[in-house]
Amino acid sequence: MTFSARPLRLRTTDAGFDAALAARLHWSADTDAGIEQVVADILADVKRRGDAAVLEYTNRFDMKAGSLLELQLRRSELKSAFDGLPDRQRDALVAAADRVRSYHEAQKKASGESWSYRDADGSLLGQKVTPLDRVGIYVPGGKAAYPSSVLMNAIPAQVAGVGEIVMVVPTPRGERNALVLAAAHVAGVTRCFTLGGAQAIGALAYGTESVPRVDKITGPGNAYVAAAKRRVFGQVGIDMIAGPSEILVLADGTTPADWVAMDLFSQAEHDELAQSILLCPDAGYIEQVQAAIDRLLPELPRAEIISKSLNGRGALIQTRSMEEACDISNRIAPEHLEIASGDPHRWEPLLRHAGAIFLGAFTSESLGDYCAGPNHVLPTSSTSRFSSPLGVYDFQKRSSIIEVSEAGAQTLGAIAAELAHGEGLQAHARAAEMRFKR
C-alpha cells in the first residue's frame, strides 16, 4: 500500500492565518471519561489490596504471572542482557550513556550544589541540596522498546545521588527486550519490575508488599499511565504529563531539503498525533521539502503512521522572514526546535520557548533523542513556556538553611515582630521578642 503526506500549507500573509494555525496546534490533554474511571478504579484497588491487585491487572492487561516475585528482575539478569548484546550495540549503548552522564554531571555542578553565606550580623543563610531517597521510572513497552528512555530517566537520577531507582516496564507478551534491560544495567537501575499501565503507577505511588513506594515518578506512557500519574500527584512527585511528540524546523533554505523532510518524519513516525511543522520564508524551498516528502516517504517502514501524522497535524508554513518565523516559533513553544540555517547563532537569541534547541544543519533532532547528552524528556504542548527538560534538578530537593546570630535576632526580630503584630499573630511576635536582649 502506498501512503502520501500533504501537510497543511499556510502563509502568514493569508487572511485567517492565526485561526488556521491555532486549529492545527490544538491538542486536548483531557482524558477520556472512560479511561479516567478505569484508572481511578485500578488505583483505588492497588491502594487497598497491594500485590494482589497489581498481579490481577497485570494478568488481565499484560502477561500471565503467578506472583509479583516472577515480575522482579534480578540485577544479574540486567547484566546478562548487557553482556549478550552484539558488540556494536553494546558499544553504542555505553557511548550514549557516557555522554548523557557527562552532561548531567556538568548540570549538577552548575546548579545542584548547596551554598551559604553570612550577613553583616553573622547570621548564616543558605540552601541545602539533597537527592530524593527513591524514584520510580516508567519505561514504555508493548508497541516498541525504548532503551533511550531508560538512560534519560535513570542517569540524571543516579547523578543526582538518588539512593534507589525502581524501574517498571510492561512486557505484554512476556518478551524481555535485551537492549532495555542492558540500558537499565548501564544506567544504574536498582530494582526492575516487568509491570506496566495504571497498576504500575499505583504500585510505585502507594507501595505494595513487593513494590516499594517511591518519592517521584518520571517517564512517559500511554493515556492510562498519564491519567494515573495525574491522579497520584501529591502522593508522589511527577515529572510532567507528556503530550504527543513535536518538532518545529526553522529553515532558511540552506539545508538539503531531504534532511529537513526526514527530520519532520522523525517525529511523525512516533504517533499519528505527533506534530511536525516547517517555518520558512522561501516558497521554493518549501516546494522542495514537499517533493522530498513525496519521494522519501514510501521507503519507510512506518509510512502509514507518518502520513497520518503529517496529514492530520503537520504544516508547511511560509513566513515573511526568518524573524517572523522566530516569533511564530515562540508562540508555538515546541518540544524540539531545529534551526536549519547556515547561521543558526543569528537566530537563537530570538528564541525564548523550546524544550530543546538544535543548532545548524548537522544537528538532527534524533541525535538529541539518543546520544548528544542533554535529556530527551522534554515539555510538550506549548508547556516549554514554563517548563524545562528533565534533569538532575528533578531528582533533588532544596532546604533553606537559617542560623540567626544573637545580633541578628535583635535586627530581624524587630522587623518580624512589627509585621506579626500587624497580622494579628501575637505568638509569632512574642517568639521573636523573647530573644531580645534585656
Image (cartoon, grey):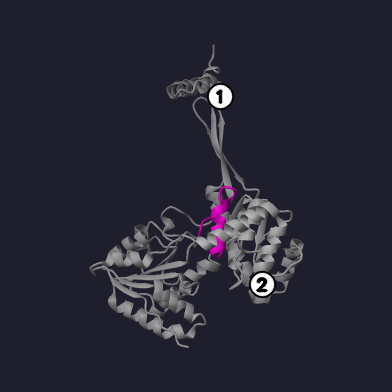
* Mark 1 and mark 2 residues within 8 Å of each other at the beta carbon: no
Residue 423, by quadrant, is top left
Secondary structure under badge 1? Answer: loop
Q: Which residues are magenta?
A: 219-241
Residue at image mark 2: 177
Residue at image mark 1: 405
Residue 382: x %, y % from top left: 41, 59
- Residue type for callout 2: Asn
- Residue type for callout 1: Ser
Vertical arrangement, residue 206 with respect to residue 249, above or below? above
Would residue 205 be visible to someone looking at this image? yes
Using the image as rendered, state which of residue 18 and residue 100 is in the foreground.
Answer: 18
Residue 166: x %, y % from top left: 67, 57
Question: Left or right of 206: which side holds 358?
Answer: left
Residue 253: x %, y % from top left: 33, 74
Vertical arrangement, residue 336 with respect to residue 161, above or below? below
Using the image as rendered, state which of residue 146 and residue 240 is in the foreground.
Answer: 240
Vertical arrangement, residue 45 with respect to residue 397, above or below? below
Label 1 vs 2, first from the N-terminus = 2
Residue 365: x %, y % from top left: 47, 69
User: Alpha-carbon distance for marks 1 and 2?
Assistant: 59 Å
Question: Left or right of 8: which side holds 405?
Answer: right
Residue 105, by quadrant, is bottom right
Secondary structure under badge 2? Answer: loop
